[in-house]
Amino acid sequence: MKIPVFRTSLVATASFLPLSLIALIVFLVIYSWPAIQYNGVHFLWTNNWNLGNLYGNPVDVHGQQIMPGAAYGVWFLVVGTFLSSFLALIIALPLAVGAAYFLAESLPKWLASPLTLLVDLLAAVPSVVFGLWGYSLLIPLMGQKVYPWLADALQGVPFLGGSPGSGYGLLTVAIVLTFMVVPLISATMRDAIASVDAPLKEAGLSLGLSRLEVFWHIILPKLRKVLIGVSILALGRAIGETMAVAMVSGNALNYLPNNIYTPISTMAAFILTQLESALQDPTNMAVEALSEIALVLLAISVLVNSAARLILWMSKVR
């Protein structure tokens, strides 16, 4: 019996990525299982992360060895992660959709092509470069010039007034993330706008609508599901960002933001910044707790991306 080598190779290659994801989930569950047993699910809404006395003697709590005074609550990370990601998405959506329409409909091809390349190249910039840009330019500019003026002008508006801080914080993280997700949204929307039937656009123009009205009333409603899908994909990208966020967030510990200028921490950045300290825990519970955070972050990313794929698939079949 002849073995279909080519087909077998394709199946093996296609199976590698989902099997890798399953293997990663299994590994994180097994490795973080002591922390899962000790913390339970309430660690997600408990606002207390403390490695305890790393120079003391381990104590036994609920059958697990931990350092004296250790506690692992990550509610401030959950809040910081979702606030920064959603704020970045709110800022990025109009910029990305506007850029996509401008490149697809308003420019001649000879000019649109190089500008499209420049926008797409933003997606290839390493995240640490965005973080360095945010640290060296954005933080001083925002902290010394923009945020004081903005906080004063919006003093009476909840969550927008108050202390402007030093430049590190929620809004700075959102701005950096915006530049990182705009190319993803723009590229998808640009192709979708270009694929809309020309007679549909011309029918709107023939009825006396302006080009902007055609876009708002005809093109955008037709691409609603595509926009929702790519927005969820961009949200997943923002949720998982690590290095750039760690450089501009201020790495807040155990407190929630009281305005958009307050320092925060996100789950991905917190794992990075806390790993060295956690490795000093002789019981290994701190590292296992960080692995539990990684498991939660992975589950969120999988759910977000699965939702995006489902919406995009539904938009194609209807």
Image: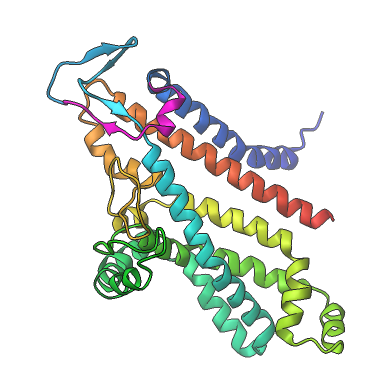
Answer above or below: position of 314 versus 18.
below
Q: 10 and 304: which one is in front? A: 304
* Viewer-proximal residue among 302 and 63: 63
User: What is the x, y in percent for residue 49?
Assistant: 29, 33
The part of the chain drawn in magenta is 39-53
Residue 108 vertical position relative to residue 292 in the rendered view, above or below: below
Residue 251 spot, x, y in % from top left: 28, 49
User: Quarter of the image holding residue 173?
Assistant: bottom left
- Residue at 47% across, 49% down: 82
User: Is residue 124 among what the camera can see?
Assistant: no
Q: Which colour scheme is used?
A: rainbow
Quarter holding the N terminus?
Answer: top right
User: Which residue is located at x 37 percent, y 36 percent?
Assistant: 74
Q: Is residue 298 magenta?
A: no
Return the x and y of residue 308 as percentages of the image width and height.
Answer: 65, 50
Task: Locate residue 278: give its quadrant.
Answer: top left
Foreground pick, 124 / 133: 133
What is the quadrant of the C terminus in the image? bottom right
Left or right, 70 with respect to 122, comes to left
**Any part of residue 210 in sight:** yes
Q: What residue is drawn where x is 86% and y is 89%?
A: 206
In the rendered view, does 279 fall on the left or right side of 169? left
Q: Residue furthest left?
A: 55
Left or right: 141 as drawn, with respect to 31: left
- The image quadrant of residue 262 is bottom left
Q: Residue at x 42, y 61 (%)?
A: 174
